[in-house]
């Protein structure tokens, strides 16, 4: 198996891109939740469908878990970047 080496600059840029992409994903979750939940509530009330209203807390739970997982991953990568690259005296600190 061929060994692949990645320069610290490329690794740093890739990790920073992952954190920024994760922020975009989180905003997509929030936007989706803000659109779907009120639609379900309105549809459930309009049609007198109590099942839809009962499902909403579980739907909210799914979104909260997805958001927390995204936040955990982003925090983990951010801490790794901070400790490995953004400490005082690092030449990569000047790259971003």
Image: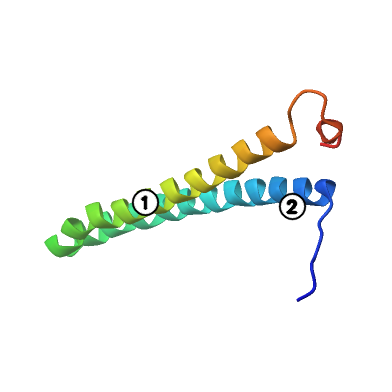
Tell whether 79 sits left or right of 35: right
Confirm or deny contact between disc 2 and disc 1 (CB under 8 A): no
Does residue 62 appear left or right of residue 11 in this picture? left
Q: Position of residue 51 (x, y in %)?
A: 15, 64
Neighbor class of circle 2 (other Cα within 10 Å; few <14, some 14-19, many 20+) is few
Q: Residue furthest bottom?
A: 1
Tell me if I can see residue 4 in this picture. Answer: yes
Nearer the observer, 49 or 33 = 33
Q: Say whether residue 70 is left or right of residue 11.
A: left
**Number of numbered tags placed on the structure image:** 2
Q: Position of residue 31 (x, y in %)?
A: 48, 51
Please name the residue that numbered disc 1 is placed on.
Answer: 65
Residue at image point 82% right, 51% down: 10
Task: Identify the mark nearer the N-term, 2 or 1.
Answer: 2
Looking at the picture, how far across and down is residue 75, in whole percent? 54, 40
Q: Residues within 10 Å of mark 1 (few under 14, many from 20)?
A: few
- Please tell me in which quadrant of the rendered image residue 46 appears: bottom left
- Which quadrant holds the C terminus? top right
Q: Secondary structure at mark 1?
A: helix
Instruction: Tell me the element at label 2.
Output: helix
- Residue 17 against residue 89 in the figure, above or below: below
Q: Splitting the image into 4 quarters, where does residue 37 fall?
A: bottom left
Relative image position of residue 74 (x, y in whole percent): 56, 44
Query: Distance between the Cα atoms at labels 2 and 1?
Result: 25 Å
The residue under label 2 is: 14
Residue at figure coordinates x 29%, y 52% from the top left: 61
Picture residue at 80% right of the left edge, 65% below the top = 4
């Amino acid at each position: 198996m061929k060994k692949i080496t990645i320069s610290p600059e490329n690794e740093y840029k890739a990790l920073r891109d992952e954190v920024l992409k994760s922020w975009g994903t989180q905003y997509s979750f929030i936007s989706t939740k803000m659109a779907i939940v009120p639609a379900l509530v309105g549809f459930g009330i309009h049609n007198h469908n109590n099942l839809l209203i009962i499902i909403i807390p579980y739907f909210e739970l799914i979104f909260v878990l997805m958001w927390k997982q995204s936040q955990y991953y982003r925090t983990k990568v951010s801490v790794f970047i901070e400790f490995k690259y953004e400490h005082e005296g690092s030449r990569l600190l000047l790259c971003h």
